Image (spheres, helix red, strand yellow):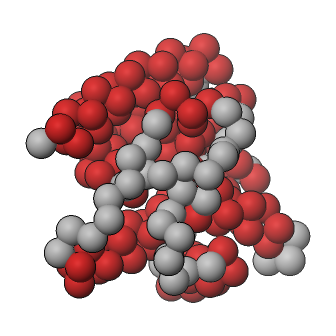
Amino acid sequence: MPLVYTELRRIANRYLQGERSDHTLQSTALVHEAYVRMTEQALPQWQNRAHFFAVAAQLMRQILVDHARSHRASKRGGDVYKLALEDAEEQPKVLDFDIVALDDALKSLALMDEQQSRVVELKFFGGLSVEDTADVLGVSASTVKRDWTTARAWLYRELNRSAAV
């Protein structure tokens, strides 16, 4: 764990940068909760370092979505944040986004194209490079680039449609 802790904190910080200012989870708590969930599950054999971090990023996303859903339920809508997907290519800035809406959109995308959904999760949330994402998914870097472009456009349209409702 000490060998990967710094990288897990970086992933957690990336997730939390876009959260509301009164968010109660801190990056350390998010890493620890993800670790607890990892130890409670029968996880696959790690293919490589990127695969480990991809699973960790997915668990962190689930934790934050669960947290946001419970916060929304208590607030009956609360403050909603928007995600600018064109900013996802850049190093993360402080983004305002609705993680629940993004999670719902990613689930819809996964029904249409599981690989595109995984590319978004690995690149955007996991912070993996195109090459690392390709390694985790077992596809070429050009396939990841193509899937990333297509998925980003689809999510942008989907999130803007749901924001207009």
Q: Tell me the residue at 79%/77% (across/down).
A: 1
Q: Is residue 155 left or right of residue 46?
A: left
The mark tally for this picture is: 0
Tell me where residue 66 sits by quadrant.
Answer: bottom left
Q: Tell me the residue at 52%/28% (across/down).
A: 86
Q: Visible in this render: residue 118?
A: no
Q: Tell me the residue at 45%/73% (across/down).
A: 63
Tell me where residue 162 sits by quadrant.
Answer: top left
Q: Residue furthest right?
A: 3
Q: Tell me the residue at 38%/22% (across/down).
A: 153
The quarter of the rendered structure image containing the C terminus is top left
Tell me where residue 53 sits by quadrant.
Answer: bottom right
Q: Is residue 23 left or right of residue 104?
A: right
Q: Visible in this render: residue 94?
A: yes
The percent position of residue 102, horizontal first and vertical second, equals 35, 48
Q: Is residue 86 above or below residue 79?
A: above
The percent position of residue 115, horizontal first and vertical second, equals 42, 33
Q: Is residue 142 left or right of residue 70?
A: right
Q: Is residue 101 above or below residue 12?
A: above
Q: Is residue 154 above or below residue 3?
A: above
| Front-most of residues 73 and 110 | 73
The percent position of residue 41, horizontal first and vertical second, equals 48, 78
The percent position of residue 88, horizontal first and vertical second, equals 57, 36
Q: Is residue 10 above or below residue 51?
A: below
